[in-house]
Amino acid sequence: MEDIKRTTLTPKEELDIVELARTERRKLDLGMGPLGEKIFAVLRDNNIQLLYFTLEPKDSKGLAAFYLKKYSSVTGIHSYYIAINTSIPLDLQIFNACHEYYHHIDEIDDSLHLRRMGEPDDELIDAKANRFAAEFLLPTESLTTYVKKHNRGEVFLKNWSKNAILRLIAQIQIDYQVPYRMIVKRLYEVDSINSIEKEDLLAIDERNENSVYYKIGKTMNDYIFKKLNTATLKSGVDSEALNVILQNYDEGIITVDTTVKDLKLFQLIY
């Protein structure tokens, strides 16, 4: 099995990402509370056009989302697009949208960025984008306050049983509408759990309907929990035709320029 080298952010890079997420929340007048599905409306309201497509992933390299920036030499206008694969669970769609939003606001002037299923933090830009999405959706100060309210003012979940921690994670997932694995990593980052607990929690198949975690989540809020763990299969255009274009690009059959021209046919790019 190929050994994937993951990129670890420096303390300075971590701090910069936290500050950037705070700045963006202030700029968008979002406060520090839960966003969840509201992120899609927030992006649309800030001149980012959202595209939805259904492209069933064949493996871990399947296309999850992309960000596209296009400049018209005729009008002198920049257009911005974030496309989300809706054949994956809603909580991951929300996370991927925020990941791509980082590519919209970062300083690197790439016109196209692709995100794939299960993409590791093997490049600095993606490590930053993932950290931004996690901080933007579940801010450090909001998470620490949340934990303290459930733990008598303490951040570290000392002497908590595994099931008790799972109940806390399920409640956070329902309230903030974010992925289970992101929450586990965030709890470790704020020193609520140790590294052994983190690895134990990450070993859980959280979407297995027979797992303890899934049963806990359904008990807390059956409607929202199942919605977060279900693909929406939403499509903004003719799904069959758009999927063919994306599949061809994904497999290297057509170029970026051809892809952009083809998307124009569906009035996705002007």
Image (cartoon, grey):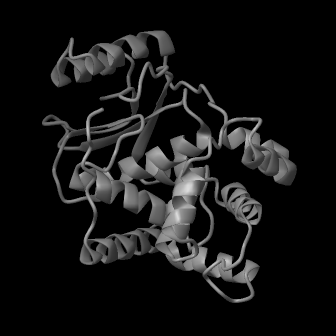
Number of marks in the image? 0
User: In front here: 138 or 46?
Assistant: 138
User: Percent from the top left, x then y, of residue 139?
Assistant: 52, 71
- Asked if residue 199 lies left or right of residue 222, the reply is left
Residue ranking furthest to the bottom:
153
Can see residue 163? yes
- Asked if residue 81 lies left or right of residue 94, the reply is left
Which image quarter holds the C terminus? Answer: top left
User: Percent from the top left, x then y, of residue 106?
Assistant: 25, 58
Please, is residue 118 above or below residue 60 in the view? Answer: below
User: In front here: 267 or 138?
Assistant: 138
* Residue 7 quadrant: bottom left
Q: Residue at x 70, y 65 (%)?
A: 165
Which image quarter holds the N terminus? Answer: top left
Q: Residue at x 46, y 74 (%)?
A: 26
Please, is residue 234 above or below residue 254 in the view? Answer: below
Please, is residue 221 above or below residue 74 in the view? Answer: below
Residue ranking furthest to the left:
73
* Residue 21 quadrant: bottom left
- Asked if residue 190 lies left or right of residue 151, the reply is left
Residue ranking furthest to the right:
219
Q: Residue at x 36, y 76 (%)?
A: 19
Please, is residue 209 above or below residue 151 in the view? Answer: above
Q: Residue at x 72, y 55 (%)?
A: 174
User: In front here: 257 or 268?
Assistant: 257
User: Percent from the top left, x then y, of residue 262?
Assistant: 28, 16
User: Percent from the top left, x then y, of residue 253?
Assistant: 21, 11
Can see residue 138? no
